Image (cartoon, grey):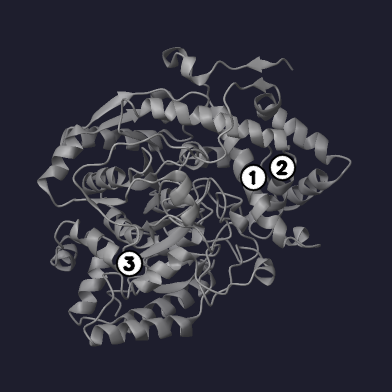
């Protein structure tokens, strides 16, 4: 294989860069064939040869071993200076979470108290929002304790279904009642802590939430890593009065994007229960989509918040790398992962984001983040700013999807945004997408092993599901030199995106290249590996993880079967407010939501 020498990124004429369609070559295996393949890959006799063939077929060998890259490595995102956002409300990171939430609340449009009667008259479907719950509590219509009983009954019902929906890995009814009773007392005393008081929020199983264990979707991780306190972001939610509903199901160790989990059962998509939710934050997205909780926290190292949000028809937000402190999660210390909110509306995403934001001491020093701020959505300046936004679209990439229904729905909403708000869409080019995929895989794989190895003991590898063992074998095949090459590619990918942002404010793509895949019955007990499907699910989401950009997925329609379709907005570093502003506007003009096939109306149920 010949050596390839890349020109420095800043010398490349982007107008002459052809689009290369992404193709992933790997077997789709379930059941016995998956077990046999994993046995071969893990064997000393065959493993190296099999992985070498797979990496060569997918151009990883050429990219990582036979390419000369002139750029220096970038071992964590290094952001160039950014201009402050306008028409925003800035907030100090040191402000208590409840006060930050109050700041965000004042930036929202006025609350519509007639929503319930309007929905009843029109027979349309709208999710209950955080402010709907808060209004019901403050008006005495219900209490957090009443809602808790409805949630407990719904969780029991979800487990008794055929097939069971498996929303949670750890759920304790008494713990839920205890938190709800404390919140109810605060309302009775007229002293709720914030708009989030009494709001039920699910926590992904790789984020610490005391007294629950953090299993990470495994059957053993909690035995070697004890949870003694909340993760930082969970502690911030708790200080706002949020009720932490339990530990949500996930793809084991986050090493997959379908949500398949043979240990605890695979979470079902509330829109069509024979289909995947997407992952790895499968439980959080399904819990929100089914109406059980108003919001959830997930982790996103390779689209793990945005993919399931898109497939389940809810909003999922990935912040700029370092904007939230991920201390107290299994993935802490990585360079691609964040903790982000999932909710049914962009306004609810904003309220939860307000509570959890705040960089770690290390990230404050090395990243020097712009001050956090919220868009002032209820002002006339908001409409003026929307009209001035320039959206970047790489058309060849945008259309490279498994189902044209996805790209066509996203295209339609962009036309509506232009007609309604006056936004302009400009063509951009983002080269080296295959290199980006390779760099992300090496980076997240190496960091995943780094998180796991300190807790790894004899026999625990065999307790992992087969697709995770296969991924681990692939990650273990990377050399230290591969990791350094990946970081040099990271610098190039950062350059290309910063060049695009000289001409546009937001990059737009479909969130995923397909709607929710069907769950093969043969995958439920043993698992599944389908890297081609994973490639379509991850096609558009890697840059925000590799180079740390903020991104949000919002629902913009459904395919012919009624499965949700998501649009992704990618922003400049630290420009969360711009994304929230545009996402909220798109949400207003998007097609009506469809009621999921499985929906628990826990607020009306009381």
Q: Which of marks 3 and 1 is in front?
A: 3
Tell whether 169 sits left or right of 224: left
Q: Please, is residue 431 above or below residue 601 in the view? A: above
Please tell me the numbered disc located at residue 96.
3
Q: What element carries label 2?
A: helix
Between the C-alphas of marks 3 and 2, the distance is 43 Å
Residue at left offset 39%, top offset 52%? 316
Looking at the image, is mark 3 or mark 2 earlier in the sequence? 3
Residue 292 visible: no
Question: Looking at the rendering, in which quadrant would you find the C terminus?
Answer: bottom left
- Place of residue 71 in the rendered image (x, y in percent of width and height, measured from the top left): 57, 24
Check whether the beta carbons of the residues at disc 2 and disc 1 lie within 8 A of each other.
yes
Count the marks: 3
354 or 28, nearer to the observer: 354
- Place of residue 97 in the rendered image (x, y in percent of width and height, measured from the top left): 33, 66
How packed mark 1 is, by other alpha carbons closer than 10 Å (few <14, some 14-19, many 20 or more), is many
Tell me the quarter of the picture where residue 114 sits.
bottom left
Residue at left offset 33%, top offset 57%? 349
Q: Which of marks 3 and 2 is in front?
A: 3
Please tell me the numbered disc located at residue 474.
2
Residue at left offset 40%, top offset 34%? 80
Task: Return the residue at label 1.
Answer: 445
Q: Please, is residue 221 above or below residue 61 in the view? A: below
343 or 287, nearer to the observer: 343
Residue 250 visible: yes
**For the view shown, which residue lies furthest in the front direction?**
365
């Amino acid at each position: 294989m010949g050596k390839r020498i890349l020109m420095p990124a800043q010398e490349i004429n982007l107008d002459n860069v052809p689009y290369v369609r992404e193709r992933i070559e790997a077997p789709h295996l379930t059941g016995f064939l998956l077990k046999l393949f994993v046995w071969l890959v893990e064997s000393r006799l065959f493993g190296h040869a099999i992985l070498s063939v797979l990496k060569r077929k997918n151009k990883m060998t050429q990219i990582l071993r036979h390419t000369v890259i002139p750029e220096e490595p970038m071992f964590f995102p290094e952001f160039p200076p950014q201009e402050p956002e306008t028409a925003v409300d800035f907030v100090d990171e040191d402000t208590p979470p409840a006060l930050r939430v109050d700041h965000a609340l004042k930036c929202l449009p006025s609350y519509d108290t007639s929503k319930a009667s309007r929905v009843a008259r029109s027979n349309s479907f709208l999710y209950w929002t955080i402010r709907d719950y808060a209004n019901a509590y403050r008006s005495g219509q219900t209490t957090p304790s009443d809602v808790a009983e409805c949630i407990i009954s719904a969780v029991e019902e979800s487990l008794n279904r055929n097939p069971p929906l498996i929303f949670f890995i750890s759920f304790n009814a008494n713990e839920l009642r205890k938190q709800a009773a404390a919140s109810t007392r605060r309302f009775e005393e007229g002293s709720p802590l914030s708009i989030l008081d009494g709001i039920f929020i699910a926590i992904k199983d790789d984020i610490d939430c005391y007294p629950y264990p953090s299993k990470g979707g495994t059957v053993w991780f909690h035995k070697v890593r004890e949870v003694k306190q909340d993760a930082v972001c969970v502690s911030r939610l708790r200080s706002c009065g949020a009720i932490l509903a339990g530990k949500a199901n996930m793809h084991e160790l986050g090493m997959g994007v379908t949500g398949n989990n043979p240990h605890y059962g695979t979470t079902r998509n509330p829109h069509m229960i024979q289909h995947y939710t997407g992952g790895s934050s499968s439980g959080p997205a399904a819990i929100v989509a089914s109406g059980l909780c108003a919001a959830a926290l997930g982790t996103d190292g390779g689209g793990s918040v945005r993919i399931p949000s898109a497939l389940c028809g809810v909003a999922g937000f990935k912040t700029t790398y370092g904007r939230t402190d991920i201390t107290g999660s299994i993935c802490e210390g990585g360079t691609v992962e964040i903790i982000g909110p999932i909710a049914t509306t962009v306004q609810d995403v904003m309220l939860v984001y307000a509570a959890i934001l705040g960089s770690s001491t290390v990230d404050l020093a090395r990243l020097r983040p712009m001050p956090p701020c919220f868009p002032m959505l209820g002002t006339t300046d908001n409409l003026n700013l929307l009209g001035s936004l320039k959206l970047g679209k790489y058309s060849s990439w945008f259309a490279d999807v498994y189902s044209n229904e996805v790209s066509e729905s996203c295209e339609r909403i962009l036309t509506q945004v232009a007609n309604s708000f006056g936004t302009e869409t400009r063509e951009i080019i983002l080269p080296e997408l295959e290199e980006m995929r390779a760099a992300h895989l090496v980076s997240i794989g190496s960091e995943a092993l780094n998180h796991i190895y300190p807790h790894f003991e004899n026999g625990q590898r065999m307790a992992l599901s087969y697709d995770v063992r296969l991924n681990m074998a692939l990650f273990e095949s990377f050399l230290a030199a591969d990791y350094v090459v990946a970081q040099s590619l990271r610098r190039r990918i950062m350059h290309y995106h910063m060049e695009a942002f000289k001409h546009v404010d937001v990059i737009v793509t479909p969130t995923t290249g397909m709607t929710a895949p069907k769950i093969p019955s043969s995958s439920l007990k043993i698992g599944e590996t389908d890297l081609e499907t994973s490639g379509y699910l991850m096609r558009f989401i890697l840059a925000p993880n590799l180079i740390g950009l903020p991104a949000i997925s919002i629902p913009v329609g459904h395919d012919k079967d009624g499965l949700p379709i998501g649009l992704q907005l990618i922003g400049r570093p630290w420009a969360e407010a711009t994304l929230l502003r545009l996402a909220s506007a798109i949400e207003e003009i998007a097609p009506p939501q469809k009621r999921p096939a499985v929906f628990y109306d826990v607020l009306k149920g009381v």
